[in-house]
Image (cartoon, rainbow, N blue to C red):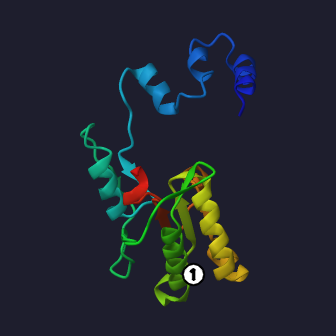
Amino acid sequence: IADAEIQQLVQRHLSGDSRQANWSNADLSLFDECKAAFGSTITLTEHRRCVPQIIGFSNQIAYIPENIRLIPVRQTGSEALQAIKTIFVPNGYVTLSGGQPQNLPEAEAIVEQVAKMIKDPSYRGMTIGVVTLQGNKQQDLIREKLIHRIPPGEWEKRQLRVGMPPDFQGSERNVILLSMVMAPNANS
């Protein structure tokens, strides 16, 4: 929503409210509002959608400074797929396209992985998303390669989607592949 629209909504619905200034700032979150109102940081304590291995990863890298641990509510059975799997692309390299990084070997490896998953019975009925972490050019490259490799019926059945992290807000997939884009030559 444009800032002007937010200002209009604040004036219409919060006129005279002492919290008006906080709500009119689109850069503040509900957590910021709670901190202002209650004087302390409010954080999540439970996570309902991710499996324990993913929550454990988040606990290791993101929640240490706060001495907070998320508790995974969702549990998995013994038949569950490996929650986090890394695939190293040894021949990966970064080029710039329109000022944005691209990694062709990584894009090809991701397309190959998606094609394998579609044929693998372990992934039957699962939805798939590919998240690129560096610019739109990598996203476009992967999407183009997937269009030429994966039949349209599989795109629909798998709800196959390629995008940046914000493109997946409110949209779950059973399997997410991350395109890091970066490679050892990225700084040269």
Q: Secondary structure at mark 1?
A: loop
Where on the picture, by quarter, is residue 81?
bottom left
Left or right, 155 with reference to 116: right
In the rendered image, residue 25, in percent from the top left (x then y), is placed at: 59, 23
Residue at image point 33% right, 45% down = 62
Report whether residue 175 is seen. Answer: no
Q: Residue furthest front?
A: 188
Q: Is residue 31 above or below residue 18?
A: below
Left or right, 85 with reference to 124: left
Q: Nearer the viewer, residue 18 or 188?
A: 188
Residue at image point 61% right, 54% down = 136
In the rendered image, residue 133, in percent from the top left (x then y), is placed at: 50, 54
Disc 1 packing (10 Å; few <14; some 14–19; many ≥20): few
Amino acid type, label 1: Gly
Q: Nearer the viewer, residue 169 or 49?
A: 169
Left or right, 161 with reference to 57: right
Q: Is residue 135 above or below residue 177?
A: above
Q: How many numbered marks are there?
A: 1
Quadrant for the N terminus in the image = top right
Where on the picture, by quarter, is residue 182?
bottom left
Q: Is residue 111 above or below residue 95?
A: below
Residue at image point 69% right, 13% down = 15
Residue of label 1: 125
Left or right, 14 with reference to 63: right
In the rendered image, residue 132, in percent from the top left (x then y), is placed at: 53, 58
Residue at image point 35% right, 57% down = 55
Q: Nearer the viewer, residue 52 or 152?
A: 152
Report whether residue 61 is seen. Answer: yes
